[in-house]
Amino acid sequence: MASQLQAPPETTTSAHVRVAPSRAPGFAKGLAVTVVVALSAALCLALVGGVANALAGNKNAPWILGRASGITSYLLLTGLVLTGIALAHPWRSRFTRPSQVNRIRIHVAFAAFTAVFVVLHIVVLATDSYAGVGWKGTFIPMASTYRPLPITLGVIGLYAGLIAGITASLAGRITGRIWWPIHKVAALTLALIWAHGVLSGADTAAMMVVYVGTGIVVIAFAFSRYAARNHADQVTARERTTDDTQALPPLLGGTSHDR
Amino acid sequence: MTADSSQAPATSALMRVDRIACIGVGICAMRAPDLVSLDPWGYPIVEASLSDSQLNEARAAVKGCPKRALALAWSAIG
């Protein structure tokens, strides 16, 4: 890798400017998006209808729905964290597809779907008297009569996730010095929700493979993200090994952003 | 716009990218899609110069950058 590296870029430059903005052609792309959205909507309606039909008349339906929405939320949150780590991963630029803008959109889509299923999870279990959580238990730590500590982990995770999502959506109105550290720390929300799921679920034994597997994947991916060196790390390392940065051999890879 | 030695030179706003600090998250392109596009590796390509009406959008991109790798600058023209 190092042998392919080129001269270090200027620390600050405005030379890499856009000459002609690229805009995707409209009609074909719009038609494709419309078809995909329509098919997705039809599929979702069919699935919801099937679930509603299966649960009709079942007195345990709220509990089943609450658990199903909770597990779905956990899996979506896992996807949200993985795509978030990928957005800033130093290995990210090895892959040019999907584009970084589309990766952000995927990350935001995970956030939106996670929020939807969390709301469903909360509403179903808060309104189910059998669950023993209630509205207070949903929003106030240790207020649940059902497994108060594990439920509290979920409550804290809910607030942490809300703060992370709201501050990130306000990026630009609030400075990156605020939202970015919050966003990184909020990835630990997944750990809270992991513990919430493991400790509060009545079906944890059946789900343990999923919990352990997703946990290992996320930890390994996060480790690779923080262990991998980015170009700022490479520059710092080079500066430590020489007093004369002007005489440095070629440093950074031959991508257009480095010129 | 003509240069006048008795007055301060006219300036043009532009965005500068610190290409070592930038990690290519891409928030700038989301906040200022008309001013910033991303290259295939996710790093920003910025407009050569900014009009007054584009300044607010540019400020949002600068402010939202998590690594403070974007900055507004003014260059003399004329």
Image (cartoon, coloured by chain):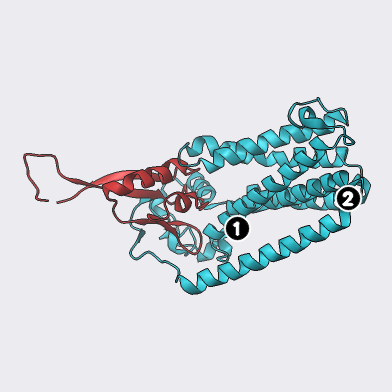
Q: Chain of mark 1?
A: A
Side (left or right) of B36 relative to A73: left
Percent position (x, y) of residue A122?
Answer: 76, 39
Question: What residue sits 47% from the left and 42% below the top?
Answer: B64
As rendered, which of A40 and B56 lies closer to the eye?
Answer: A40
Query: In the rendered structure, are the residues bearing label 2 and label 1 in contact, judged by CB atoms less than 8 Å apart?
Result: no
Quadrant in the picture for residue A91: bottom right
In the rendered image, which residue does mark 1 sit on? A91
Considering only order in the chain, which callout, 1 or 2, is on the residue closer to the N terminus? 1
Which residue, as the protein is rendered here, is positioned at the far bottom? A28
Q: What's the residue type where badge 1 is placed?
A: Trp
Closest to the camera, between mark 2 and mark 1, is 2
Quadrant in the picture for residue A121: top right
Label 1 sits on a secondary structure element that is helix
As rendered, which of A237 and A212 lies closer to the eye?
Answer: A212
Quadrant in the picture for residue B6: top left
As rendered, which of B1 and B6 lies closer to the eye?
Answer: B1
Question: Chain in cyan?
Answer: A
Residue B39 in the image: above or below residue A171: below
Q: Chain B drawn in what color? A: red
Percent position (x, y) of residue A30?
Answer: 51, 69
Question: Can residue A48 be seen by looking at this rendering?
Answer: yes
Label 2 sits on a secondary structure element that is helix
